[in-house]
Amino acid sequence: MKKIIIIDGGPRKNQNTAQLLQRLAEGAKSASADVEVKTFRLYDLEYRGCMSCMACKLKGKASNICRFNDSLTPILEEIARADGLVLGSPIYFGEVTGQMRAFLERLVFPWLSYNDYSLTAPKRMPVVLVETMNGTPERNNSNGFGSMDYCLTSALGEPQRIVAYNTCQVAHYDSYELGGFSEEAKRAWRDAHWEEDLQKAFEAGRQMAGQ
Ligand SMILES: Cc1cc2nc3c(=O)[nH]c(=O)nc-3n(C[C@H](O)[C@H](O)[C@H](O)COP(=O)(O)O)c2cc1C
């Protein structure tokens, strides 16, 4: 049985990022009955970023899975054995959310060798990175997964990237101080692109499960 792990790094349970990840999970399940898809929502968990305990670098006991014990521990262990990894985040101030960044510190630091600066995960696997944002393809401030993109690519393999631009942040723009956005323009963008974004996510899931 193949196992795909989805990490949802956004706080909203049923908005843009979560919907894309949900559709990706549906795509994976549609490919085969022999696939288990598990979604973890980082905002539901109590955990820290890297504590710099250096336990993963101890001579004779070095580990490429984080040794700091909290609610992320079983998830990091599952990822080490998984057959596919999906990371999704809204873009906040040009980056993935703080929760996603803290998670990535815990995932990636144990992969990094301070002997030769190589990056070695317990296992290479297909990866999909999902970003959602207000920005458009022409005008955005997203640095995406930033320096973590290189680490993930190096240790796991070249990711497939899905970016949903110009998402609707609220259902009724009139009820908020959001004068910089036109609800009409947002809706027009959504009508033109959202189904396609969802379809890309579905296909990415189907492909990952088939790999
Ligand atoms: C705190 C915060 C910061 C944000 N910063 C950016 C940003 O820098 N660039 C951008 O394009 N969108 C930004 N956004 C918009 C979100 O990325 C966008 O609405 C996203 O699709 C929300 O995902 P969700 O619907 O899954 O919560 C920000 C939203 C919040 C709440």
Image: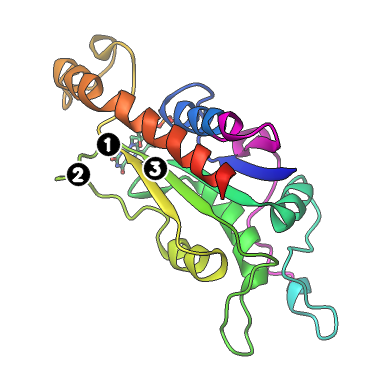
Cα separation, mark 3 vs mark 1, equals: 8 Å
Whether the residue under disc 3 has CB within 8 Å of ligand 1? no
Closest to the observer: 130 or 70? 130
Q: Quadrant of ligand 1?
A: top left
SS at mark 2? loop
**Looking at the rendered structure, which numbered label has been put on residue 137?**
2
Whether the residue under disc 1 has CB within 8 Å of ligand 1? yes
Quadrant that contains the N terminus: top right
User: Which residue appears at 44% of the width and 68% of the height?
Assistant: 150
Range of residues picked out in magenta:
28-54
Q: Residues within 10 Å of mark 1 (few under 14, many from 20)?
A: many
Image coordinates for residue 24, horizontal then vertical, percent:
50, 34
**Looking at the rendered structure, which numbered label has been put on residue 97?**
none
Q: Is residue 106 above or below residue 16?
A: below
Asked whether the beta carbons under mark 1 and mark 2 sit within 8 Å of each other, the answer is yes
Asked where in the image residue 53 lies, by quadrant, the reply is bottom right
Relative to 115, 168 lies left or right:
left
SS at mark 3? strand
Q: Which residue is mark 3?
A: 131
Relative to 179, 54 lies left or right:
right
Cα separation, mark 2 vs mark 3, equals: 12 Å
**Does the magenta portion include 46?**
yes
Asked whether the beta carbons under mark 2 and mark 3 sit within 8 Å of each other, the answer is no
Q: Residues within 10 Å of mark 3 (few under 14, many from 20)?
A: many
User: Which residue appears at 39% of the width and 42% of the height?
Assistant: 131
Q: Which residue is mark 1?
A: 165
Image coordinates for residue 173, horizontal then vertical, percent:
25, 14
User: Which residue appears at 65% of the width and 52% of the height?
Assistant: 83
